[in-house]
Amino acid sequence: MTEKLYEGKAKILYTTDDPDILLTHFKDDATAFNAQKRGTIVEKGKMNCQITVALFQWLESKGIPTHLIKQSADDKILVKRVKIIPIEVVVRNIAAGSLCRQTGLEEGSKLPFPLVEFYFKNDELGDPLLTRDRLLILELATEEQLKQLQNLALSINQHLQEFFASCQITLVDFKLEFGLDKQGKILLADEISPDTCRLWDQTEKDPQKRVMDKDRFRRDLGKVETAYQQVQKRVLEQLGSA
Ligand code: C5P
């Protein structure tokens, strides 16, 4: 018997017959600005599912533990049941988005080192940026877990940057979520897709045309589906030829 466990903005989580395994369904629904803007991106569920599977498998091959078991349909994956750590880990290589708004850094400026940030995964509070001490006071993670999250995020960034570069895509920034398995081991969870990354086409210099991610939807740049399709095509082609 499967039952709906949780419905988020872009995915639905179902139970399966095995209590240790859940099913994730990727939806076509798109939201931005904490769901103040809503829409649909045609075939997004399938595209994000394919891209996530490809990237998670690739990261696994590099030694990054993930919750992915296998893809079970075009827009569905089976995953290990984990307790999601309520922290959104954002890694940035180039200034964009909220970093520019909050610091005045110019969009597109290369950061001197990858910036790892922790945000509180809490819709009611609008996912605020946390300090290390706030994290500890809220008991969202232990000091040891924070160290592990930081190291995992940096390692994932290195692998992904290299991979996307081979697809002629610049990895500007992205968001990760992690969960704890039954043994308390930290696994990469959720998704990695154009919904959760900023990806710029290296073959395009125009600052609007180069955008291949959800910013096309957020900023009404048009051709959202085409951008997602391009990311999917390049990622899958690159892995096929790797
Ligand atoms: O909005 P901001 O610049 O902080 O986003 C940084 C990165 O994290 C972007 O790639 C964005 O798509 C991703 N993100 C996300 N989910 C959130 C917040 C940010 O995927 N709730």
Image (cartoon, helix red, strand yellow):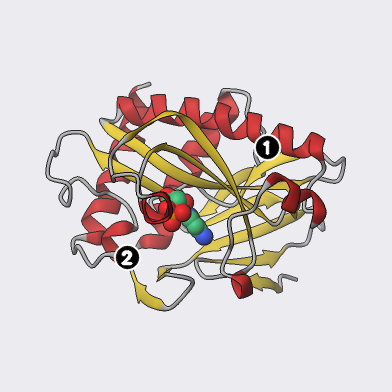
Image quadrant in which the C terminus is located: top left
Residue 164 lies in what quarter of the image?
A: top left
Question: Which residue is at the far right?
Answer: 183
Q: Position of residue 79 (x, y in %)?
A: 66, 50
Considering the image in quadrants, where does the N terminus appear? bottom right
Q: Nearer the viewer, residue 56 or 30?
A: 30
For residue 93, above or below residue 49: above
Residue 80, given in percent of the width and then of the height, sits at 72, 48
Ligand 1 has an atom within 8 Å of the beta carbon of the residue at disc 2: no
Residue visible at 80% across and 45% down in the picture = 181
| CA separation in Å, label 2 and label 1 | 28 Å
**Does the image show residue 231?**
yes
Q: Which residue is mark 1?
A: 149
Q: Amino acid at mark 1?
A: Leu
Residue at 56 percent of width and 29 percent of height: 154
Q: Is residue 226 left or right of residue 89?
A: left
Query: Which three-letter amino acid code belongs to the residue tagged 2?
Result: Arg
Q: Position of residue 11 (x, y in %)?
A: 54, 65
Residue 49 appears in the rendering: no
Residue 222 position, x and y percent, is 18, 64
Disc 2 is placed on an element classified as helix
Name the side, left or right, on which 57 lies relative to 228.
right
User: Does residue 126 appear left or right of residue 100 in this picture?
Assistant: right
Disc number placed over residue 218 in the picture, else none = 2
Q: Residues within 10 Å of mark 2 (few under 14, many from 20)?
A: some
Name the element at disc 1. helix
Instruction: Say above or below: 45 vs 4.
Output: above
Q: Which mark is residue 33?
A: none
